[in-house]
């Protein structure tokens, strides 16, 4: 059954028990209610609407979509007559990615048959947007990282922050446009926001005294997986080796979210590997092999790549280094033209530096 909690006189949070503890909020004002996200299944969001109209005697004027992910927006259509508010990027992604996701969901699940995508009526591209109604001010802040369009919603008068998926027991960066770097920035912003209560996109409400530790723990987790994946790439280890890097090896030990926590973690590290593989340069392994013979002059003469590299124009000197650097990658994926071209320059610089040092 959907859980309802009253966080202050006018602020409620609903938590799904059918799909990974997704949360949705309601802010009550004398002029109507504002809903922040919806719940994944039709009956859950209908339950919300019935509670707002029946128990609270209000009408929903606005629905804020915090980001385009299905589990947060599939119930928007139930609030007919409400104005939908979202970041402009969210509107674009709803139109493309969420529509595609809905088609797939409707093929798999009869529960989704009636769901329709509602495109936002009010959008903004600024870093903040204020939504006011009946004496309440909701401050929507762009908070990219989990997804590029995400906004957090601060109920200013009540100091309740609906952080959406910027704050999750296991931070998630694996979806479309997810970015670890951006999420770190957004989490730092959350730490600096002075609030009484923080509603995560999934899971329990976090109270004032626990917010900083909890969010800092998530920052540390992201830094840990970033370092691990970079090390993996530098050591030229395959993506498969990441399967041994379990969630228990990070600082996040007491994580709820059912069995999904480990999945989320694995999806994160795999996505990060793909994101970083073009920018992280492996430790030089083969250049060392060519450097060794330099100590023994006789062997150096025999090492033909070195001689070839030293003699002709600098462009040629760069080529063997470039090819060597590209080889391990070529095992998994065919090398593409652009990254290879970029490597010509960096490879050349390296060779030149080496040459200078060896003098
Ligand atoms: Zn999400």
Image: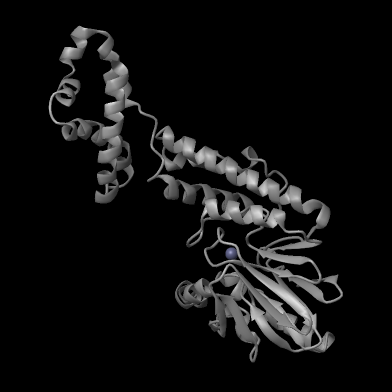
Identify the coloring. Answer: one colour
Relative image position of residue 274 (x, y in whole percent): 42, 49
Quadrant containing the C terminus is: top left
Relative image position of residue 41 (x, y in whole percent): 64, 76
> Seen in the image, is 122 located left or right of residue 313?
right
Q: Residue at x 66, y 58 (%)?
A: 167
> Seen in the image, is 53 located left or right of residue 105?
right
Q: Quadrant of ligand 1?
A: bottom right
| Nearest to the observer: residue 34 or residue 355 | 355
Quadrant containing the N terminus is: bottom right
Q: Is residue 359 above or below residue 64?
A: above
Q: Residue at x 48, y 35 (%)?
A: 231
Relative image position of residue 331 (x, y in whole percent): 30, 41
- Can residue 1 be seen from the camera position used here? no
Q: Residue at x 55, y 39 (%)?
A: 245
Farthest-out residue, right: 9
Q: Is residue 161 above or below residue 75?
A: above
| Nearest to the observer: residue 54 or residue 31 | 31
Q: Quadrant of residue 192?
A: bottom right
| Nearest to the observer: residue 214 or residue 30 | 30
- Can residue 315 be seen from the camera position used here? yes
Q: Is residue 294 above or below residue 70?
A: above
Relative image position of residue 5 (x, y in whole percent): 82, 70
> Seen in the image, is 302 located left or right of residue 167?
left
């Amino acid at each position: 059954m959907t859980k309802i909690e009253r966080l202050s006189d006018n602020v409620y949070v609903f938590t799904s028990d059918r799909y990974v503890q997704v949360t949705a909020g309601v802010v009550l004002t004398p002029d109507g209610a504002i809903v922040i996200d919806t719940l994944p299944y039709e009956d859950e969001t209908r339950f919300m609407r019935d509670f707002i109209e029946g128990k609270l005697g209000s009408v929903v004027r606005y629905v804020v979509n915090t980001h385009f992910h299905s589990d947060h927006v599939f119930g928007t259509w139930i609030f007919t007559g409400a104005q939908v508010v979202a970041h402009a990027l969210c509107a674009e992604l709803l139109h493309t990615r969420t529509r595609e996701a809905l088609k797939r969901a409707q093929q798999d699940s009869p529960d989704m048959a009636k769901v329709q995508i509602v495109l936002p009526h009010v959008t903004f591209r600024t870093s903040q947007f204020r939504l006011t109604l009946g004496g309440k001010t909701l401050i929507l802040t762009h908070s990219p990282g989990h997804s590029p369009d995400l906004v957090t919603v601060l109920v200013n008068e009540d100091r309740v922050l609906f952080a959406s998926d910027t704050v999750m027991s296991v931070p998630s960066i694996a979806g479309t446009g997810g970015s670890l770097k951006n999420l770190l920035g957004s989490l730092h912003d959350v730490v600096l926001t002075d609030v009484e209560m923080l509603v995560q996109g999934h899971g329990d409400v976090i109270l004032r005294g626990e917010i900083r530790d909890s969010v800092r723990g998530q920052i540390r987790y992201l830094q840990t997986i970033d370092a691990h994946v970079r090390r993996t790439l530098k050591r030229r280890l395959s993506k498969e080796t990441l399967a041994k890097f379990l969630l228990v090896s990070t600082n996040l030990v007491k994580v709820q979210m059912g069995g999904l926590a480990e999945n989320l973690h694995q999806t994160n590290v795999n996505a990060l590997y793909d994101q970083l593989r073009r920018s992280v340069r492996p430790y030089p392994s083969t250049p060392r092999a060519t450097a060794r013979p330099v100590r023994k002059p006789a062997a150096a003469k025999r090492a033909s790549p070195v001689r070839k590299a030293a003699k002709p124009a600098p462009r040629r000197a760069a080529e063997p280094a470039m090819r060597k650097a590209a080889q391990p990658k070529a095992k998994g994926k065919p090398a593409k033209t652009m990254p290879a071209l970029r490597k010509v320059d960096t490879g050349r610089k390296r060779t030149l530096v080496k040459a200078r040092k060896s003098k």
